[in-house]
Amino acid sequence: MRVEVLTGAALDAAIDDVAHLRISVFRAFPYLYDGDLAYERRYLEAYRGTGRAVLVGAFDGTRLVGAATGTHMLDHAEEFSGAFEGHGIDLTTVFYCAESVLLPVYRGQGAGHRFFDLREAHGRALGCTLSAFCAVQRPADHPLRPASYAPLDPFWRKRGYAPLPDAVATFRWKDVGETQETDHPLQFWIRPLDPQTSSSGLKYPGVRGSAPASLSPTGLKP
């Protein structure tokens, strides 16, 4: 399996495959997304229209088996600005890591780290000093939660991310088995992009005052 950044014609050629991957991977818990190909194509079209976006693909031979996207937070400011209100974070300094999808059989081989490595590098090249993503919140007793389900929190924390308290966005989609779209809360996680910056109470570029408490390596909220 190889992982590489896709641009230009390679990016254009991969869009439909990314749409199918999103529908397949996000159908599983915790997203339970009952995807629609037409919507996916419209959503992903935005990555063709901005010079700030990145698409990272994982390939088994010529087959796309995983993908991750990211772009400047300003490209999503309308949807996300409310979640960041009151945190003193300048959105012009934030790179947004969007979806990261990988077929189950290819997991555990390092693609997840490469997805973040390459997107974070793209964020630094754009001049961003913070990286963020959001993850859906589901109750622990959700009826469709598999007994074997393992949250990705330990992986994200190893990457240096931590939840930003009360930074929650709301999105609508139709869950598997449902007939209508419903609201879903997504918690933001954040980290500084400067590898030399400690995440223990120091001041970060783009953050007014001290770093948010959630960036401390201890005492993190779940």
Image (cartoon, rainbow, N blue to C red):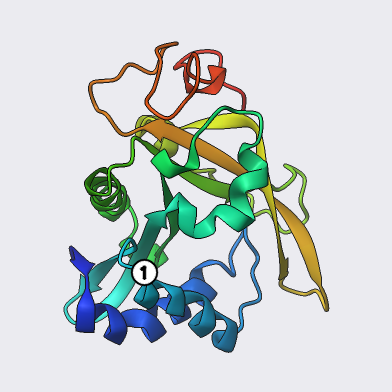
Q: Is 219 on the left-hand or right-hand side of 202?
A: right
The answer to whether residue 148 of the structure is visible from this angle is no
Q: Residue at x 49, y 36 (%)?
A: 90
Q: Residue at x 63, y 49 (%)?
A: 147
Judge the density around disc 1: few (<14), some (14-19), many (≥20) Cα neighbours within 10 Å.
few
Q: Position of residue 70 (x, y in %)?
A: 38, 58
Q: Position of residue 157 (x, y in %)?
A: 43, 31
Q: Is 220 on the left-hand or right-hand side of 97?
A: right
The answer to whether residue 17 of the structure is visible from this angle is yes
- Does residue 209 sit above or below 100 in this rendering? above
Q: Is 213 on the left-hand or right-hand side of 110?
A: right
Q: Which residue is mark 1?
A: 50
Q: Residue at x 67, y 48 (%)?
A: 169
Q: Position of residue 3 (x, y in %)?
A: 20, 63
Q: Quadrant of the N terminus?
A: bottom left
Q: Type of residue at label 1?
A: Thr
Image quadrant in which you'd find residue 115:
bottom left
- Does residue 135 sit above or below 33 in this rendering? above
Q: Residue at x 36, y 69 (%)?
A: 50
Q: Position of residue 140 (x, y in %)?
A: 72, 42
